[in-house]
Image (cartoon, rainbow, N blue to C red):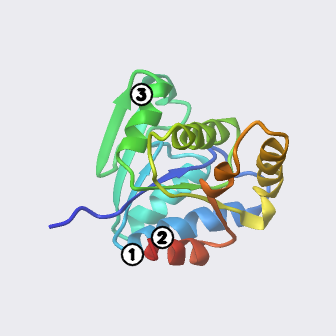
Amino acid sequence: MTAPLSLCVYCGSRDGNDPAYAEAAEALGKAIADHGWRLVYGAGDVGLMGRVARSAQAGGAETFGVIPTHLLQREVGKRDLTTFVVTETMHERKKVMFMNADVVVVLPGGAGSLDELFEVLTWRQLGLHAKPVFLLNVNGYWSKLTELVEHVVARGFAGDDLLGFYKVVESVEALTEAVEAL
C-alpha cells in the first residue's frame, strides 16, 4: 500500500481577526480528509492549527503532529493524533515536519509561520529540496508578503527563481486542484 500524500501545514496558533481564516483552516482539514491525504502540522490544539487538525480528524484523515517540549502547554499539545512527536527544540520540530511531508501549505499565521515559510524557501534556494510550497491567500492575507518577495528580487537580493519556489492560491478548492495536479 502506498503512503498517503502528506501536506505540511504551517499556520497560526491563533484564529486571527477575520472569520475567513478559521473557515479556510477547517475547509483545508476537511479537504485533506476527503482526498485521503495526511496532515503534518505543529501538533497544537489552538488557533488555526487546532481547527485544521480537528477538521482533518473528523473526516478520518491521518494526522502527524510535532511539538517541542516547551510548547506542550502553550499550544495545548493534541495527543489524540495518529502520530504525536515531541521534540526538544523548535529546529527539530521544523525538520521533522518538513521531512515527513510531500507538500507545504501556508495558511495565515504570525512570526512562526513566516519563519517556517522562509526556512523552506531558503532550503529550496540552496537546492536542498524541490517540494511544492503553496500560500493559501485567504482574503489577500499573503498579498503584501508576495509584494515584499518581489521587491527583494527586484533589488537584486535574490534571483527570479525565488518567485517560482511558491505558488499563491486563493481558496482551498484552488489548492486541492493544484495539489491533485502534481
Asked which quadrant contains residue 114, the reply is: top right
Q: CA distance from mark 2 to mark 1?
A: 10 Å
Q: Which sits earlier in the primary sequence, circle 2 or circle 1?
A: 1
Check contact, mark 2 vs mark 3: CB within 8 A.
no
Q: Nearer the viewer, residue 174 or 24?
A: 174
- Residue 78 appearing in the image: no
Q: CA distance from mark 1 to mark 3?
A: 28 Å
- Residue 58 location, x and y as percent? 40, 67
Q: Is residue 22 above or below residue 42?
A: below
| Pointer 3 residue | 92
Amino acid type shown at disc 1:
His
Amino acid type shown at disc 2:
Val
| Pointer 2 residue | 179
Check contact, mark 2 vs mark 1: CB within 8 A.
yes
- Residue 164 location, x and y as percent? 63, 57
* Extreme-left residue of the structure: 1
Instruction: Tell me the quadrant of the picture where the C terminus can be found.
Output: bottom left
Q: Which sits earlier in the primary sequence, circle 2 or circle 3?
A: 3
Residue 15 located left or right of residue 103: right
- Secondary structure under tag 3 reads helix
Q: Nearer the viewer, residue 40 or 49?
A: 40
Q: Which sits earlier in the primary sequence, circle 1 or circle 3?
A: 1
| Pointer 1 residue | 35
Crowd band around label 1 with a 10 angstrom C-alpha radius: few (<14), some (14–19), many (20+): some
